[in-house]
Image (cartoon, rainbow, N blue to C red):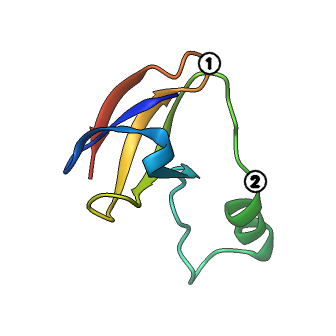
Amino acid sequence: MIVVPCPNCGPRNSSDLRNCGEVVERPDPQITTIAEWRSYLYLRKNTADWMRETWYCRNGCRKYFVVERNTVTNEIRESGL
C-alpha cells in the first residue's frame, strides 16, 4: 500500500487514487513531426529514480494532481495541483 498526499483531501490510500503516469510536456502541434507525436503518446522513460507523476483522486475530490515519487522506494517528496 502506498499513501499518497492529495493536496485537497490529505493522505489517501493509493487504491482511492489512479496513477495516470509520468508527466510529459505536450509538444507544439504546429511544428511537431509524426515521430515526435508518436514519442509523446507512447514512449516513457520509466526510470528507477525520482519521477513526476499525475494522479487522479477518484474517491475524494475528483481532481488531478502531480506527485514527485521515487519509483524504487515509493517515497513521496512533493505533491501539488
Amino acid type at image mark 1: Val
Callout 2 environment at 10 Å: few (<14), some (14 to 19), or many (20+)?
Answer: few
Does residue 33 lie above or below 11 as drawn?
Answer: below
Is residue 34 rendered to the left or right of residue 72? right
Is residue 1 rendered to the left or right of residue 36? left
Which of 4/22 is in front?
4
The location of residue 28, given as percent across then percent down, is: 53, 74
Does residue 8 lie above or below 39 as drawn?
Answer: above
**Which residue in the protein does label 1 denote?**
72
* Residues at marks 2 and 1 touching, judged by CB atoms closer than 8 Å: no
Is residue 79 rendered to the left or right of residue 46? left
Amino acid type at image mark 2: Leu
Q: Farthest bottom residue?
A: 30
Residue displayed at 80% across by 68% down: 35
Does residue 45 lie above or below 24 as drawn?
Answer: above
**Which residue in the protein does label 2 denote?**
43
Which of 8/34 is in front?
8
Residue displayed at 39% across by 25% down: 76
Single out the mark in the foreground, 2 or 1.
Answer: 1
The location of residue 67, given as percent across then percent down, is: 39, 39
The location of residue 48, given as percent across then percent down, is: 66, 23
Does residue 50 lie above or below 23 as drawn?
Answer: above
